[in-house]
Image (cartoon, coloured by chain):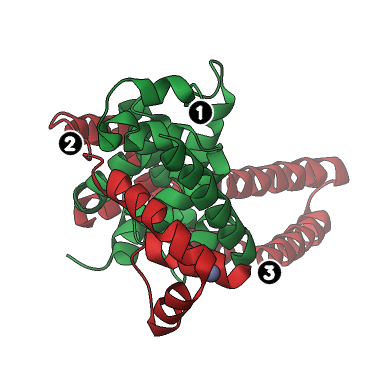
Chain colours: A green, B red
Amino acid sequence: MGTDEELIGRVGVGDQDALAELCRRYERPLYHFIARHTGGRDVEDLYQETWLRAVRAAPRFDPSRRFSTWVFQIAVNLCRDWHRRPPPEPVEPDDNLASTSDAPEARIDARRLLAALPEAQRTVLLLRYYHGLSEEEAAEVLGCPRGTVKSRLHAARERLGRFVESA
Amino acid sequence: MTGCEDALVAFLLDQVDAAAVDHIRTCPRCRAEQPVVRALAVRLAADPAPTPPPTLAPRVLTAAGPLLARNAQGAAWRAAWPAVARALAAALIPLPAILVFDVALVRAIYSLLGAVLPHGLSLYLVVNHAALLALLLTLTYGAVPFLAARQARLLLQDGYRHG
Ligand SMILES: [Zn+2]
């Protein structure tokens, strides 16, 4: 069926089969990324919009780029815009979260941990932890230097560590 | 300090190399933080990834239909454009020669008629002749853009059939 880059090239000339194959390959990673980013809200709409933007931009896709980072870049931008829309950021986990159960694992689940992070740190953590992107790939997706990716991940680790510790 | 952060993040991401292992083992701060990072990794790993609904893919493909059609049309136009440009160029190249020939023809006829007919009558006939030539030329070249567009449309349909 071809590489991702060949397929998006064919989407650029209107090939629906190529789009179906790309959707099949990236459905789970993109859906999971968006779901974790928004805490499960508006996932389907954002997922669909990611693909519509990809199809619209496909004729201008630079074949020297990696499709995976390109499509994640679109999803990241959409999620960023989504977070700027009202209603704003989800609630900050606070001490109340720690009082629901005695088992530490149940007190703060991953969704609440992710919601506790500022959008930029959450994006980096999702890309690096859940999607296995290298520091370089994450920097490419975010359009920022590798040092920024590193410092955001450090900050995220530290912040979440404090939540876990206090739980 | 950075050594600690790098080591702890590598531990979180499950990407520890020998240097990070050495560091964590010997650094009091990292040894103290290691259980917390492990607890964090456990929580993050336990996050159940939501399953996309089966209706999602067909919905996306349906919504993308008009955009795909536009991509196909754009690609066909890009492919057809050189052929259309060649057709226009081929039609325009002989135009100066045709104009020179027509002017020479009109002049020759005018001098020929002027020798045998009264001046007014020969002028009238020559002007008629020139007008007819101009009309034919206008009709011919006026048709060029329409023919070129038709050519592009045919190439477009051809592109759809083979694409
Ligand atoms: Zn250390």
Is the residue A65 above or below the residue A42 in the image?
A: below
Whether the residues at callouts 2 and 1 have beta carbons within 8 Å, the answer is no
Residue at image position (30%, 63%) is A4
- Of callouts 3 and 2, which one flags the residue occurring earlier in the amino acid sequence? 2
The amino acid at mark 3 is Ala
Label 2 sits on residue: B51
Q: Nearer the viewer, residue B103 or A101?
A: A101
Which type of secondary structure does the marked residue at label 1 adopt? helix
Residue at image position (47%, 24%) is A95
Residue at image position (56%, 20%) is A88
Looking at the rendered structure, whether the residues under marks 3 and 1 are on a common chain is answered as no
Which residue sits furthest right? B119
How far apart are the alpha carbons under marks 2 and 1? 21 Å
* Image x and y of residue A104, in percent: 30, 36
In which image quadrant can residue B59 be found? top left
The amino acid at mark 1 is Trp
Which residue sits furthest top? A87
Residue A85 located left or right of residue B161: right
Whether the residues at callouts 3 and 2 have beta carbons within 8 Å, the answer is no
Q: Tag 3: Cα neighbours inside 10 Å, few (<14), some, or many (≥20)? A: few
Q: Which mark is residue A82?
A: 1
Mark toward the viewer: 3 or 1:
1
Q: Chain of mark 2?
A: B
The amino acid at mark 2 is Thr
Which type of secondary structure does the marked residue at label 3 adopt? helix
In which image quadrant can residue A97 be found? top left
Q: Nearer the viewer, residue B134 or B108?
A: B134
Q: Quadrant of the N terminus of chain A?
A: bottom left
* Image x and y of residue A154, in percent: 55, 56
Q: Chain of mark 3?
A: B
Q: Which mark is residue B97?
A: 3
